[in-house]
Image (spheres, coloured by chain):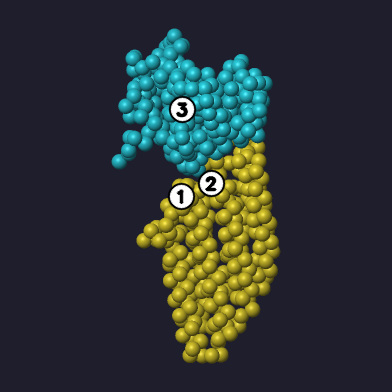
Chain colours: A cyan, B yellow
Amino acid sequence: MVDNNNFALKTNNVYVHYGNKMAINNVALDFPKNEVTSLIGPSGCGKSTFLRCLNRMNDVIDSCKVEGSFIMNNTIDIYRDDLPIENLREKIGMVFQKPNPFPKSIYENVAYGPKIHGVTSSQSELDDLVKESLHRAGLYDEVKDRLTDVATGLSGGQQQRLCIARAISIKPEIILMDEPCSALDPIATAKIEDLINELKENYTIIIVTHSMSQASRVSTKTAFFHLGNLIEEGDTSKIFTKPDKEQTNDYITGRFG
Amino acid sequence: MKEHTDKNFENRLTAIRDQLSEMSAVVEKQLSLALNCIKSKDSDYSITIQNLDLQVDDFEKAVRDECFEVLTLHRPVASDLRLVFTALKVSKEMERIGDHCRGLSNKAITSKSDLDPEIIEALSALGRSVLSVVHEVFDSLFTGNIEKAKESWRRDLEIDKLYKSILKTLIDKMEKNDSIIETGTQHILIAKSLERIGDHAGNIAEEVIFNISGQYQDIEKIRV
């Protein structure tokens, strides 16, 4: 019997429409706690749309209509009307394709979230949290002597790790990543992937990626989307050795015709 | 299955399949000629088998090199990865079958003709069974027929029984007539080579089942 407590987020009967166009068609997908789940599929398959549903990023798009069940920790309906969006984003953070640090200092980038959400009660506690978050993001040693420097002066890979530090500074439970390495070189990518592997001890991570090899390297679960449908999901090792569906096999082996 | 969008990758996988196919044909020919040697002791057969063995060795190296390049340059996954993995292992098993053919043909043509015809016939029958299993397992590899692969795996048991029967008969005869010990021993080694070829066919069947199903299966369960 499946233990529901092992899932950070469960989704069911998910439909997403942009106007009359269906983007997600009856998807049910559950995300195990402290694991990394990759969402893969060709452009336009709905994987990013689905990811953005998971912390209600689509709410700001007028034409976007989201239906279905999104239950966090087996109790919280994340689309509940009386749930403040900022409280939801405190629990479900997001890292975007392009690093997007605030035009502020490195310190302020990480401290901003905890200040807004009142995570800390004193300056020294905030200092410690900033330091800890930068540590966890594998960035502290590289920036410890220039915390007051403007964050946009960092390299692309450092900026992305800063964004991860910013996301984890408010102690979320789930981190959503939308192609977090697509703008990075192989070394910066390897550092982020290594970081993802470490972060899963404390967080549930859901990552959208176009890189099949990245999905196979970083995730324990993989879900394959095509034309808004969830074609197959399962253990990453199984998906990349013997997927059940021929459509999955065709996609991951490069048979796109 | 659809073709790869990357034609170079598709061509390389096709090359691996084609090389395995050609290799299997040469190995089957070697085995067929080796069985002729048991009866006829014609040294021409042995020379041909040795020449074919050089081809088999070259095929094994070619498959190995092609698989290595495909792994390095194309990083195959799923069905492609299983194909490359299977090709590497099956080509090695085929190469070993070729070695056994060469060895047993040498023994057959150099041994004396002082054994009962019934022993030679029993060895030939064992050889025919082995050839049939080898043919069946190659067929399962290229047609992707998992049931045929399982069947050839089961038939390896028949080969083991025939081998044990020949072994017992030869030992009994050698105990009664020590003048045939040298020839008897040669023919035990020939029978052992055939039995080992059956084992290699069983190993290939295991790889065929993995290639199709993605799992290694318990041989004993399939045999039951």
| Disc 2 to disc 3: CB gap under 8 Å | no
Q: Chain of mark 2?
A: B
Query: Disc 3 and disc 1: Cα gap in Å?
Result: 41 Å
Q: Residues within 10 Å of mark 3 (few under 14, many from 20)?
A: many
Q: Residues within 10 Å of mark 1 (few under 14, many from 20)?
A: some
- Residue picked out by circle 2: B82
Q: Position of residue A238 (x, y in %)?
A: 47, 42
**Where, by quadrant of the figure, is residue A35 drawn?**
top left
Amino acid on which disc 1 is placed: Gln
Considering every residue shown, the one lying at the far left of the view is: A1
Q: Position of residue B66 (x, y in %)?
A: 66, 48
Q: Nearer the viewer, residue B155 or B121?
A: B155
Amino acid on which disc 3 is placed: Lys
Quadrant of the image for the C terminus of chain A?
top right
Considering every residue shown, the one lying at the far top of the view is: A62
Q: Is residue A227 above or below residue B20?
A: above
**Residue B215: assigned label:** 1
Q: Nearer the viewer, residue A223 or A142?
A: A142
**Residue B45: assigned label:** none
Amino acid on which disc 2 is placed: Arg
| Disc 3 to disc 1: CB gap under 8 Å | no
| Disc 2 to disc 1: CB gap under 8 Å | no
Q: Position of residue A254 (x, y in %)?
A: 57, 34
Query: Disc 2 and disc 1: Cα gap in Å?
Result: 10 Å
Q: Residues within 10 Å of mark 2 (few under 14, many from 20)?
A: many
**Residue A171: assigned label:** 3
Query: Disc 2 and disc 3: Cα gap in Å?
Result: 42 Å
Q: Chain of mark 3?
A: A
**Where, by quadrant of the figure, is residue A136 drawn?**
top right
Asked whether residue B60 is in view, the answer is yes
Secondary structure at numbered mark 1: loop
Secondary structure at numbered mark 3: loop
